[in-house]
Image (tube, rainbow, N blue to C red):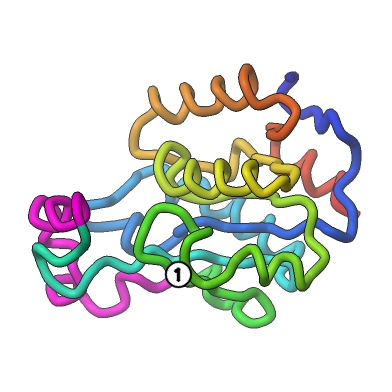
Amino acid sequence: MEEGHLEFGPLGKGCVHLCVDMQRLFAEGPWEAPWVKRVLPVVERLASARADRTIFTRFIPVERPGEGVGSWKRYYERWGDVTLERLAPGMTELLPPLARLVPPAEVLDKTVYSPWLQGDLHGRLQARGCDTLVISGAETDVCVLGAVMGAVDRGYRVVLPTDALCSSRDATHDALLTLYRERFGQQVETAMTEEVLRAWQ
């Protein structure tokens, strides 16, 4: 699959932009992903162009260290500084250029990587007549991965604007894009944001 080529044609009325976890939580502090600030203007441009067709997800940590089910309990023993009782106020909020788009954009909160397990994302999309998801945000190899695989399993066409994705690890970001292109070619397309916006009329 060539970069910048939407193999399955234009994006129609059934397209929705799912923007994953573009929050202060990932722009500063222990979980800072430096790419977040770099891709923010691109994500903002994409979301602004279709704010009424955008859903932002927010990752919400547990209240205090050691909470969580199964391996999440161990996870929050390791990452106690990013629990709600220790985070500075406002850290789970969307970054300001994106927060100003709500409404008409919507917000879906989740406590795990995937946005498909809480908040009835699939139902909300079906109510909009959605058949295609443009997925942007953070991080390519964690929460975006969860969003992509859930979308694929539910039969959505998935479009990834590669310049609107970010990770704290270059190697795994690149590896995931390679995986999508080489193994998910019938379900996942990659293109630059400019190409996506031209196709979404």
In percent of width and height, residue 5 lies at 80, 28
Vertical order, 46 against 89 (above or below): above
Q: Circle 1 sits in a helix, a strand or a loop, which is it?
A: loop
Which residue extends farthest front?
70
Relative to residue 173, is residue 134 drawn left or right?
A: right
Q: Quadrant of residue 167?
A: top left
**Residue 91 part of the magenta segment:** yes
Relative to residue 136, is residue 95 drawn left or right?
A: left
Q: Quadrant of residue 198?
A: top right
In percent of width and height, residue 115 lies at 50, 59
The number of callouts visible is 1
Q: Quadrant of residue 155?
A: top right
Q: Quadrant of the C terminus?
A: bottom right
Q: Which residue is mark 1?
A: 94
**Residue 79 part of the magenta segment:** yes
Vertical order, 146 against 19 (above or below): above
In percent of width and height, residue 64 lies at 13, 71
Relative to residue 169, is residue 118 drawn left or right?
A: right
Residue extent of the magenta highlight? 70-95
Q: Residue at x 63, y 17 (%)?
A: 182
Vertical order, 132 against 161 (above or below): below
In percent of width and height, residue 51 lies at 71, 70
Q: Residue at x 74, y 73 (%)?
A: 52
For disc 1, the neighbor class at 10 Å (few under 14, some 14 to 19, many from 20) is many
Q: Quadrant of the N terminus?
A: top right
Q: Residue at x 47, y 39 (%)?
A: 140
The kind of residue on which mark 1 rests is Leu
